[in-house]
Amino acid sequence: MKTVPSFSGFTPETIQFLVDLKENNFRQWFEDHRELYEIELLQPFRALVNTLSPAMHNIDSLFEFRTHKVLSRIYRDIRFSKNKDPYNTCLWMSFQRMGTSWENFPGYFMELNTEHVMLGMGLFAPKRKVMDVFREKIEGEPDTFRELVQKDVFGRGFSVEGESYKKPVHNTLSDFFQPWMNRKAVYVMKTLPVSDERIYSDALALLLADDFTHLAGLYRLMVEAREEVAPL
């Protein structure tokens, strides 16, 4: 079996490849630069998945860990899109339970593009019933939830994101909780600019493992909310 090396960082050439691909998004250019893509983008991403897998296994042993399933494809699905560019100008990885999707289960992600690294976790496209149960859990133990997110979400530099309802969802909680209560989907996210030196060393893997581990309490709460809902 071929051994995947540990992650030692992306390189400036990684970012430059994505910049150049954005400007030359056609098949001949990509084929001419395929070796660069594999060396500067695909190989370090595979190494990053390999390096993170033990920490992610500790969070949820049911995650999908096969690299080809964790990593996104560089090829775009253009069948139903007006944009016919054949390639994505970013690459991302996602840790989700095997057999699940963003529509019905929480998950973690990290994306690299020409401007920044984005990382986060949450319910990205849940059914209304899942969000209803999640809100009930917050209302049931608001002090516990506040302590959790102040330390492990806001304390780690994450913000709360997701599409909001036009009309606030009725609840009796204080303003602190409303960013969590009034959303159709809810996830936490933060970004690192490509000027951040950690992206170009093993420090990025250490940061991701640490941040993702701190989000485990919130992840498990979201899993509980999903599992309390009958099959969707």
Image (cartoon, helix red, strand yellow):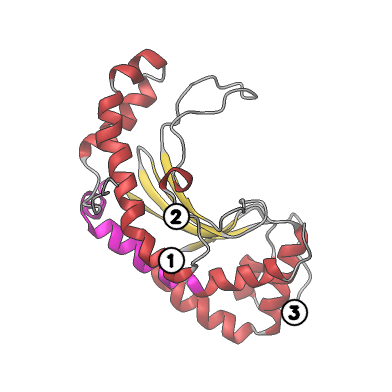
Find residue 60 and report its horizontal and vertical position in percent: 50, 68
Do tag 2 and tag 1 residues touch (Cβ < 8 Å)?
Answer: yes
Which quadrant does the C terminus fall into? Answer: bottom right
User: Which residue does the numbered mark 2 point to in the structure image?
Assistant: 65
User: Mark 2, residues whose alpha carbon is within 10 Å: few (<14), some, or many (≥20)?
Assistant: many
Disc ID at residue 57: 1
As drawn, 67 above or below 169: above
Q: Quadrant of residue 68?
A: top left
Find residue 89 and report its horizontal and vertical position in percent: 41, 32
Q: Whole-Å distance between the Cαs marked 2 and 1?
A: 8 Å
Report helix, strand or loop for mark 3: loop
As drawn, 47 above or below 181: above
User: Mark 3, residues whose alpha carbon is within 10 Å: few (<14), some, or many (≥20)?
Assistant: few
Q: Residue at x 25, y 47 (%)?
A: 195
Q: Main secondary structure of the magenta part?
A: helix
Please say whether residue 231 is one of the residues in the magenta stretch.
Answer: no
Q: Amino acid at mark 2?
A: Phe
| Extent of the magenta region | 194-216
Q: Is residue 226 left or right of residue 195?
A: right
Find residue 162 and report its horizontal and vertical position in percent: 61, 55
Q: Amino acid at mark 1?
A: His
Extreme residue toward the front, this view = 1
Please say whether residue 208 is one of the residues in the magenta stretch.
Answer: yes
Question: Which mark is nearer the camera, 3 or 2?
Answer: 2
